[in-house]
Amino acid sequence: MVRQAKAQRILSHDQIWVALDRLAERAGLSPSGLAKRAGLDPTTFNRSKRVTADGRERWPSTESIAKALAATGDSLDTFARLVGDDSGDGRSLPLLDFALAGASGAFDGQGHPSGKGWTETALPTDEDSHIFALVISGDALAPVYRSGDIILVSPRAPIRKGDRVVVKTKAGEVTIATLKRRTARSLELQPLEAAQSERTIAANDVSWIARILWASQ
């Protein structure tokens, strides 16, 4: 029992999964992309698979970790270093399932992460300490973004015409679109699905808008 308790203090469920996220990032892949390269089911490393429906933690198997290491050409020693809280090539960023982005309390008034439901991931980033990550669930944004893709979002990055952005309205709706025009009175957005018509949102109906900097696909 003493040995088991000590092991639990050294390795945690979150640390193992963050290490796999970091392994994928080093290879320029999303978690689902890493699973595919390793010859596994594409959903093996998805965040939806990390906790069961009844809230129990689900750990990756040693076989899946071994296949992931073989796919990236990394050693077990490298993976062990990635497990550490202060390891990895990038800092940890707040991560939230996009389906939860519209939930009350997920963001503060400036579009910064707030409240529960956030986990962490390690992704390439700059010195902007307010960057957060969203993981896409479902295929509503395909083919631009598919389920399992991760996007980096910055509430402070300058936004220009043609940028892909995340917009949250005061009514709680969260939308990903391309910015066509921004004035003092409104936002003109082009949905990612080309078949959908342009949308205009009154400026006083917008809670915040943030630029998408990067996506793992």
Image (cartoon, grey):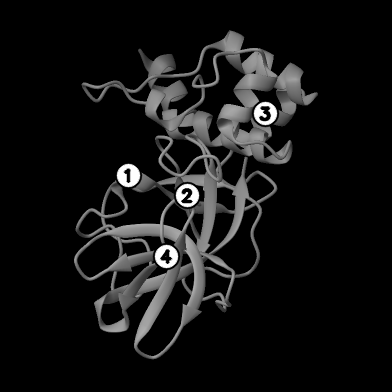
Image location (x, y in percent) of residue 158: 57, 79
The quarter of the picture where residue 53 lies is top left
Image location (x, y in percent) of residue 105: 22, 60
* Dot in front, 4 or 1: 4
The amino acid type found where label 2 is placed reads Glu
Under tag 1, what secondary structure?
A: helix
Is tag 2's residue or tag 1's residue first in the polypeptide sequence? 1
* Front residue (pair 60, 213): 213
Is tag 4's residue or tag 2's residue first in the polypeptide sequence? 2
| Residue at which label 1 appears | 99
Tell me the distance, in whole angstroms, between the alpha carbons under discs 2 and 1. Answer: 18 Å
Q: Answer left or right for 139 relative to 173.
A: right
At a point 73% along the width and 26% down the height, the residue shown is: 77
The image shows residue 43, relative to residue 146, as above or below, that is: above
Crowd rating for badge 4 (residues with CA inside 10 Å; few <14, some 14–19, many 20+):
some
| Residue at which label 2 appears | 193
Tell me the distance, in whole angstroms, between the alpha carbons under discs 2 and 3. Answer: 38 Å
Image location (x, y in percent) of residue 159: 55, 76
The amino acid type found where label 3 is placed reads Phe
Crowd rating for badge 1 (residues with CA inside 10 Å; few <14, some 14–19, many 20+):
few
Quarter of the rendering occupied by the C terminus:
top right
The image shows residue 166, relative to residue 135, as above or below, that is: below
Is tag 1's residue or tag 3's residue first in the polypeptide sequence? 3
Residues marked 4 and 1 touching at CB (< 8 Å): no
| Residue at which label 3 appears | 79
Disc tally is 4
Is tag 4's residue or tag 3's residue first in the polypeptide sequence? 3
| Residue at which label 4 appears | 198
The amino acid type found where label 1 is placed reads Ala
Is tag 4's residue or tag 1's residue first in the polypeptide sequence? 1
